Image (cartoon, grey):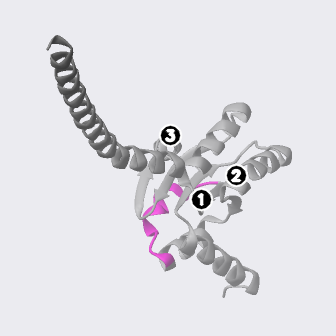
């Protein structure tokens, strides 16, 4: 019979999973409270959250939200790193903090409904372009044809100006010769 506390925990995890863009699963053994606090402070402003969860409760929540594919990663002491906004920014921040502390080992991730297995899951998620990078790429794609049109219009206008100037010089030169 589930306790009230476990029911509440499953409810909280289900809510988190229902609004996440991605979750990265890590083994947190050996990490200190100060290091967890540092990680949380780094990812919170980016729309991330780091929590420790019981595997069975996390799996129940994952199944309820359609993320049952994460089951292979839910073994041993488990920390869940949720990304609610910019997934790549959160993953890069986790990677940066872990480069300093070197204590988190990653088991897998869910990026949307796609499960990414293995220790390189964080690297794969971090390699996704951030929102500002995607927006700049879109602007570049839109601006490139416009730049070409402006260049063509400029060259046509310049050509017309040179033609008129040439004709004016020729007509002006004929007047002086006569």
Q: Give the CA distance from mark 3 to mark 2.
A: 16 Å
Q: Which residue is mark 2?
A: 43
In this rendering, the answer to whether 166 lies above or below 161 is above
Rendering quarter of residue 161: top left
Residue 63: percent from left, percent from top: 48, 75
Q: Which structural element holds mark 3? A: helix
Taking the spot 18% from the left edge, 19% from the top edge, the residue there is 175
Image point 49% across, 47% down: which residue? 125
Q: Is residue 73 magenta?
A: yes
Circle 1: element type: strand
Circle 1 packing at 10 Å, graded few (<14), some (14-19), many (20+), is many
Q: Does label 3 or label 2 sit earlier along the sequence? A: 2
Q: Residue at x 42, y 57 (%)?
A: 115
Q: From the viewer's side, name the closer residue of 18 and 164.
A: 164
Mark 2–mark 1 contact, CB under 8 Å? yes
Mark positioned earlier in the residue sequence (3 or 1): 1
Residue, far top: 177
Q: Is residue 132 left or right of residue 13?
A: left
Of helix, strand and loop, which one carries label 2? helix
Q: Which residue is mark 3?
A: 123
According to the picture, the residue beneath numbered tag 1 turns out to be 83
């Amino acid at each position: 019979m589930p306790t009230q506390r476990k029911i509440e925990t499953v409810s909280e995890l289900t809510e988190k999973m229902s609004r996440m863009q991605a979750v990265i699963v890590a083994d947190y053994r050996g990490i200190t409270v100060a290091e967890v606090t540092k990680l949380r402070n780094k990812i919170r402003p980016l729309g991330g959250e780091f929590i420790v969860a019981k595997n069975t409760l996390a799996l129940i929540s994952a199944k309820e939200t359609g993320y049952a594919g994460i089951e292979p990663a839910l073994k041993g002491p488990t920390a869940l790193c949720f990304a609610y906004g910019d997934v790549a920014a959160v993953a890069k921040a986790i990677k940066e903090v872990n480069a300093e502390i070197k204590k988190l080992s990653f088991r897998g991730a869910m990026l949307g409904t796609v499960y990414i297995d293995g220790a390189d899951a964080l690297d794969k998620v971090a390699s996704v372009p951030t929102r500002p990078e995607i927006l700049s790429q879109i602007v570049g794609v839109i601006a490139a044809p416009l730049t070409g049109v402006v260049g063509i219009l400029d060259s046509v206008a310049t050509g017309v100006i040179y033609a008129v100037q040439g004709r004016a010089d020729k007509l002006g030169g004929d007047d002086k010769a006569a």
